Amino acid sequence: MLRPVSFKTFVAWRYLRGAQGGESGSKFLRLISYIAVGGVSLGVATLLLALAVVRGFSEEIETKITGFGAHVQVENIRHAPLDQAPELMAEIGGYDAVVSVQPVVTEFVLLRRSSQDIDGVGLWGTDRLPVYLEENVISGSSSFESTTSPRLVIGNRLAENLGLSVGDRVTLLSTRNLGDTETLLAARPRLRQFEITGIYETALMDFDQTYVFTDINTARQLLDYTSEQVSRFDVMLQDVTAAQSVALLLEESLGLGILARSIFEIYRGLFAWVDLQEAIIPLVIGVLILVAAFNVMGTLLMIVLEKTREIGIFASMGASQRDIRRLYLRLGSFVGGLGTVIGLIVAWGLGTLQMHYGIIGLPAEAYYMDTAPISMHVGDFLLVAVVSLLLCLGASYFPARTASRILPLRVLRFR
């Protein structure tokens, strides 16, 4: 059995819709009511989209950077090769928090296509291409297996700058240890020819135009490493938030001469920028919701002024001050609730469109990605909805109290 709508709910809903639409006063009230609802909707949608973009930036940057490296990097404090790599690798892998340990041989070398096309690149020797890069190989193959010349996977920006494509051959020259010879005339750079078999793209400009990948044994030969030497170990953890504490633990336990750094320490500036956005943007957009709440207060005060005579009639018919106060509190909750629901729907819809179609593009050289990332969380939607409703309800209290204190006799005698 349907319960009848209460007097307070019925009147509050009619006020919101602007009943008696033929009157100019009601048209004006309807307009300002819609503006109040729109203000709340705009604040809610903007805040949610801002939170989704900031979260998306943080998660995307973390994914890209860990895709290149690891949660923790272990290396020689003097940046010299690490000896006895198998024993050290086994010791690092013995910790419960560690998921995998990847040996890496890396050094800056010269890449030569011809006598005119020479560029400095970071050679990265590894057992296999990181999974994230495998997923972002846009041309060719990510495999290093070859029966002929060694294979090389390069970034798309480097390929564009030097006019390289899959199948081209280049020469890498290592100048490592040249300073150890007695004379510069006796110095000979170590060089080797490679075939480009893959091109990757991550939108991280500094990486896409700098790093080239090959198998670890080929890198050892070019850089004059022994079979038990590596440049560093890339360590992946079960929980990235524990990276800093695990780095400190490894540094203490592995002894002097070992440097262990977390991803948050290596890319401190980048993560500090993301943290700053996470702190400032919700604060700024939160002010927008607060302004919308005050707009609700102004709207309700104008409705009180416009409906003063009706308030007097309600009071003379037996409505108590509490009833009238609840009527306007309910009206404020309708404005806030409707605005919040519309804002939630708009934010979810626009966020979904951006996630699937990447409508908003970004300059990759400035933002490390070519489209605005979105990461929507149900918890954010619930929190923003509750805060918005509470602010609108709080903003309704003063107009509601003002309406409840109107004296019916004085109002009814006023013309």
Image (cartoon, rainbow, N blue to C red):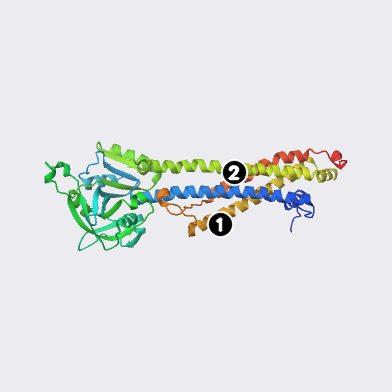
What number is the disc on residue 349? 1
Viewer-proximal residue, 97 or 313? 313
The residue to which callout 2 is attached is: 288
Q: Secondary structure at mark 2?
A: helix
Q: CA distance from mark 2 to mark 1?
A: 20 Å
Mark 2 or 1 closer to N-term? 2
| Residue 312 falls in image quadrant | top right
Q: How dense is the environment of label 2, judged by Cα within 10 Å: few (below 14), some, or many (20 and up)? A: some
**Of the residues shown, which amino acid type is indicated by label 1?**
Gly
The residue sitting at 57% across, 46% down in the picture is 384
Q: Position of residue 216 (x, y in %)?
A: 23, 53
Q: Is residue 275 left or right of residue 180?
A: right
**Quadrant of the frame with the N terminus:** bottom right
Residue 256 to residue 142: above or below? above
Residue at 26%, 62% (x, y): give it.
168
In the image, residue 331 above or below residue 156: above
Instruction: Indicate the secondary structure of the residue bearing disc 1.
Output: helix
Q: Quadrant of the C terminus?
A: top right
Q: Position of residue 289 (x, y in %)?
A: 60, 44
Left/right placement of residue 190 relative to residue 98 reads left
Q: In the rendering, at what x and y percent does residue 321 appear?
A: 78, 40
Q: Position of residue 250 (x, y in %)?
A: 30, 40
User: Visible in this render: residue 9?
Assistant: no
